[in-house]
Amino acid sequence: MSKLAIAQLDLAKRRVFVRADLNAPLDGSTVTDDTRLRGVVPTIQYALKAGAAVVLASHLGRPKGKVAPEYSLRPIAVRLEALLGQRIELAPDCVGAETLGRARALSPGEVLLLENLRFHAEEEANDDGFARSLAALADCYVNDAFAAAHRAHASIAAITKHLQPAAAGLLMQQELAALGRILESPERPLVAILGGAKVSDKLTLVEHLLERVDALLVGGGMAFTFLQSLGHAVGRSLVEPEQIETARRALEAARRRGVALVLPVDAIVADGLDSGPGRAVGIRELPAGQMGLDIGPRTVERFTGALTGARTIVWNGPMGVFERPAFAAGTLALARAVAGSPAFSVVGGGDTVAAVTQAGVAERIGYISTAGGAFLEFLEGRKLPGVEALTDGG
């Protein structure tokens, strides 16, 4: 997956269009988590040191193709100024005569942040005319927004028809290298951990991983559909009845391929999310009126044991409703187990990243992906528009 890299561009005295993912959570006008902003800082700094002026572009939220002041990138500009230690000018729009004039007036070392791309419906429509207007703002293109690379949007895909060369930024390169290491040449044994609520969200991923991994650990709400497919009564736990046959086929496929598909043997159950602390029960003893909301301590031991000897681990999805302290223990224990493994580990998805951060072990994870949907689609083996659009490397 060799793509042109930013280091291969001659950036001196050129304007570089950097597509970033600055879609950070806000509380009013304050950025509450600047992880994605910090992720793109090295690429911006690299371009500036190379003598470029940077035209920086991103979306924020879902303004549905209309100007919505609450989705302005102004708070992003303020936080980025602090991270970069220099002034960032915010354009009044991402296209138009005034924005074009400001872009052309940039001097090397300056940064112009375009206003929210999604204030224009043409962005998500991958409109060619809109893409041409964006392309007019710069001399070359760098995509550092892996988290949005699964979107065929104008600033991600169509723009590269009009603005060449199109290179990967430093963060994009890191993401592709880490995920490529899993899919293309993983050190084995390769163990995947999947959690989250629904089987249907990760059906393609389960099928794809079963062709590649040595073991697959399934927790979270999605595990109960698998357990019910085996004949277990799961009380009021989350089950997708229409996916039971699919889960049964996945278990059969794992058996056929010799892949260990490991399911919970106990769960933390309660009457509901607000019913206070739960209690651990074996999977065969789930009360009819209660629901499983976390993996239990025996499952934590089982999953931890399945990680023993692993050389590569990939994890997406929490093991329970970990945002509630009463049901966080399983996810946090697994986070510590992954971090404690000598394997190369890759963690992706907002909830999973939040879990390893909450467990205090983020710095011991091999690679933390900034992406959610793009992370899953890449692991599913899909081609990502934002990656495909980049110029092939030499």
Image (cartoon, rainbow, N blue to C red):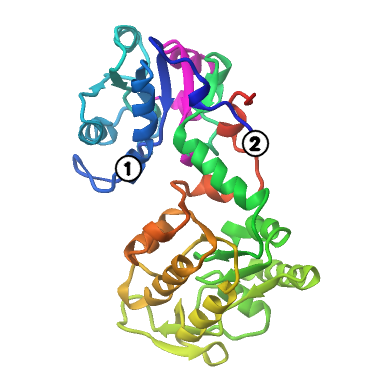
For mark 1, give the secondary structure: loop
Where are the magenta residues, as a range?
119-147
Q: Amino acid at mark 2?
A: Met
Q: CA distance from mark 1 to mark 2?
A: 29 Å
For mark 2, give the secondary structure: loop
* Left-right relation of 39 to 203: left
The residue shown at (54%, 47%) is 178
Residue at mark 1 = 24
Above or below for 143 versus 289: above
Q: Earlier in the sequence, mark 1 or mark 2?
A: 2
Q: Amino acid at mark 1?
A: Ala
The numbered disc on residue 135 is none
145 is within the stretch colored magenta: yes
312 is within the stretch colored magenta: no
Residue 80 is situated, as x and y percent measured from the top left of the image, at 26, 33
Quarter placement of the C terminus: top right
Closer to the camera in the image, 222 or 170 = 170
* Left-right relation of 190 to 290: right
Q: Tell me whether the residue at label 1 lies in contact with that at label 2, contact meaning CB atoms closer than 8 angstroms.
A: no
Residue 109 is situated, as x and y percent measured from the top left of the image, at 29, 17
- Count residues near mark 1 (Cα–Cα under 10 Å), then give few for <14, some for 14-19, many for 20+: some
The numbered disc on residue 1 is 2
The residue shown at (57%, 91%) is 284
**In this view, the mark in front (1 or 2):** 2
Closer to the camera in the image, 215 or 52 = 52
Above or below for 275 versus 376: below
Q: Is residue 119 visible?
A: no
Residue 251 is situated, as x and y percent measured from the top left of the image, at 71, 72
The image quadrant that residue 391 belongs to is top right
Closer to the camera in the image, 217 or 63 = 217
* Left-right relation of 303 to 116: right
